[in-house]
Image (tube, grey):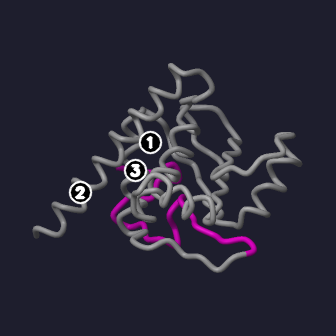
């Protein structure tokens, strides 16, 4: 696969990847980015989209709440806010994720922190690919696509551990 800036995929590493991870007001670094980045890229490719860049910014509840109030006029806590800078099929955006919400949601849904983090990550990516979740039908489709992507990630991880 050749990415947007014509660098062959095999020559890319985390420093030249169009997918970046940052933290704001907390100390957090995601684990297994060497597996997460290709998974995100494959998901984007599956929906015939073109990846320019995605910045994931991990933050606290307070930080994300302020963004929610300031930019979306929503006075509620949330686990993720996606800011698209283009429309699908072009993928450009910032995805802010509250690590506190992810931890709480993992406990609520009785899944691991890693699984919930992956779900939230791919949720933001799916938004950038043009999927919505405002209506019950859209939410059902989003859930199904998240589950598909998570199944693909787990399958790849299982293959790698068997080798």
Residue beneath label 3, please? 2
Residue at 46% over, 27% down: 140
Mark 2 surroundings: few (<14), some (14-19) or many (≥20) residues within 10 A: some
- Please report the bounds of the magenta region as a residue range: 1-25
Q: Nearer the viewer, residue 84 or 158?
A: 158
Nearer the N terminus, badge 1 or badge 2?
1
Q: CA distance from mark 1 to mark 3?
A: 13 Å
Residue at 53% over, 23% down: 138
Instruction: From the top left corner, tell me how far across and down residue 8 is, in percent.
Output: 38, 58
The reply, left or right, for residue 40 in relation to residue 65 is: left
Which secondary structure class fits the magenta region best? loop
Residue at 72% over, 71% down: 24
Residue beneath label 1, please? 44
Q: Disc 3, disc 2: CB below 8 Å? A: no
Nearer the N terminus, badge 3 or badge 2?
3
Quadrant of the frame with the C terminus: bottom left
Residue at 50% over, 63% down: 17
Q: CA distance from mark 3 to mark 2?
A: 21 Å
Residue beneath label 2, please? 156
């Amino acid at each position: 696969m050749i990415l947007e800036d014509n660098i062959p995929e095999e020559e890319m590493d985390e420093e030249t990847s169009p997918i970046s991870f940052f933290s704001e007001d907390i100390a957090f670094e995601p684990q297994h980015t060497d597996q997460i980045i290709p998974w995100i890229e494959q998901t984007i490719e599956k929906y015939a989209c073109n990846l320019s860049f995605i910045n994931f910014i991990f933050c606290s509840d307070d930080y994300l709440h302020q963004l929610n109030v300031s930019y979306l006029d929503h006075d509620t806590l949330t686990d993720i806010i996606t800011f698209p800078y283009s429309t699908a099929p072009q993928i450009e955006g910032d995805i802010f994720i509250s690590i506190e919400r992810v931890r709480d949601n993992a406990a609520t849904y009785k899944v691991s922190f890693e699984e919930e983090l992956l779900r939230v990550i791919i949720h933001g990516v799916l938004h950038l690919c043009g999927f919505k979740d405002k209506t019950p039908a859209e939410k059902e489709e989003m859930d199904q696509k998240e589950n598909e992507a998570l199944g693909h990630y787990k399958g790849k991880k299982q293959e790698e551990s068997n080798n």
